[in-house]
């Protein structure tokens, strides 16, 4: 456990961080200077992705509600788009990577904002999307990447290094005692949490 993290922060670290590392580094091979748009930047995966992509030298656009805009900027986003007033698929700006952390888009909608060599990362995706990802975008020079992040030791170790450097800090929405586990689940199921919900065992 990295020094300086609380027990709650340490517990909250792996879920978002390992998923973001798997998608951004191993799958997308994100490069410094590339532009990445993160949809659902205020969730556990999105908040880690904003920090990791910024740390790795990418220019980050966060898509979240206005209420979470300040958080996204604090985490490292250069630009923030409010999904209630702005549809990023209809703008004129293009990006190298779209990372969808909430299951809010698909390749058909993202194709026009992806640059040549662009990648769509579908962190949340059903079976149809998983199968379609095998061929979608190939003719346009894009890649669609979906599937389960394995959460291996390499990613955990990279997440711990980032936390030790101070480049990654988990965002905690709320901590519940075990006796209130149902409330904790309800908060997660609301789809409104910022970062992670933590259960305290003691
Ligand atoms: N593929 C894999 O291996 C893998 C690994 C881990 C997780 N996942 C999946 O990833 C998903 C993300 O989980 P999570 O815990 O990071 O976050 P989450 O709880 O699903 O996301 C909650 C956040 O999303 C924001 N949000 C809701 N609707 C939005 C929209 N239309 N546009 C942008 N932001 C929106 C909410 O903010 P507002 O309330 O302000 O809107 C809230 O802060 C889950 O479905 C999980 O199962 C997949």
Image (cartoon, helix red, strand yellow):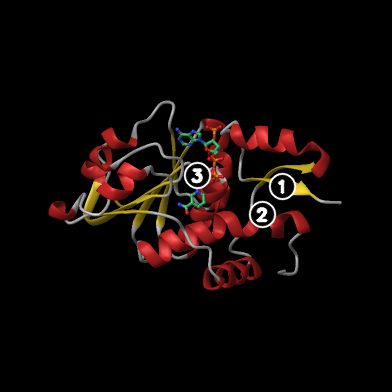
Dividing the picture into quadrants, the one containing residue 157 is bottom right
Q: Does residue 42 appear to the left or right of 139 in the view shown?
A: right
Residue under the point 58% across and 68% down:
156
Secondary structure of the residue carrying numbered label 3: loop
Residue 198: give its label.
1
Label 3 or label 1, whichever lies nearer to me, is 1
Secondary structure of the residue carrying numbered label 2: helix
Q: Which residue is mark 3?
A: 41
Q: Which residue is mark 2?
A: 12
Residue 106 in the image: state x and y as whole percent: 31, 40
Residue 149 in the image: state x and y as whole percent: 47, 59
Residue 66: give its label.
none
Q: Does residue 16 appear to the left or right of 26 in the view shown?
A: right
**Disc 3 within 8 angstroms of ligand 1 (CB):** yes
Q: Residue furthest toward the left?
A: 139
Label 2 or label 3, whichever lies nearer to me, is 2
Q: How far is the residue under mark 2 from the one under mark 3?
A: 16 Å
């Amino acid at each position: 456990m990295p020094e300086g993290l609380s027990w709650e922060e340490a517990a909250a670290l792996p879920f978002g961080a390992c998923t973001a590392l798997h998608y951004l580094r191993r799958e997308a091979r994100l490069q410094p200077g590339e532009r990445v748009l993160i949809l659902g930047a205020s969730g556990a995966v999105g908040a880690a992705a904003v920090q990791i992509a910024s740390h790795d030298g990418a220019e980050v656009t966060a898509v979240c509600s206005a209420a979470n805009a300040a958080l996204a900027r604090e985490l490292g986003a250069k630009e923030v788009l409010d999904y209630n007033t702005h549809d990023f698929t209809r703008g004129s700006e293009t990006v190298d990577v779209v990372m969808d952390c909430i299951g809010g888009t698909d390749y058909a909608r993202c194709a026009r904002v992806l640059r040549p060599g662009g990648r769509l990362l579908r962190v949340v995706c059903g079976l149809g999307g998983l199968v379609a990802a095998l061929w979608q975008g190939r003719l346009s020079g894009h890649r669609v990447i979906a599937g389960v992040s394995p959460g291996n030791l390499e990613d955990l170790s990279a997440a711990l290094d980032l936390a030790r450097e101070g480049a990654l800090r988990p965002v905690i929405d709320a901590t519940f005692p075990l006796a209130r586990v149902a409330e904790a689940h309800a908060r997660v199921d609301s789809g409104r949490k910022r970062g992670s919900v933590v259960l305290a065992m003691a």
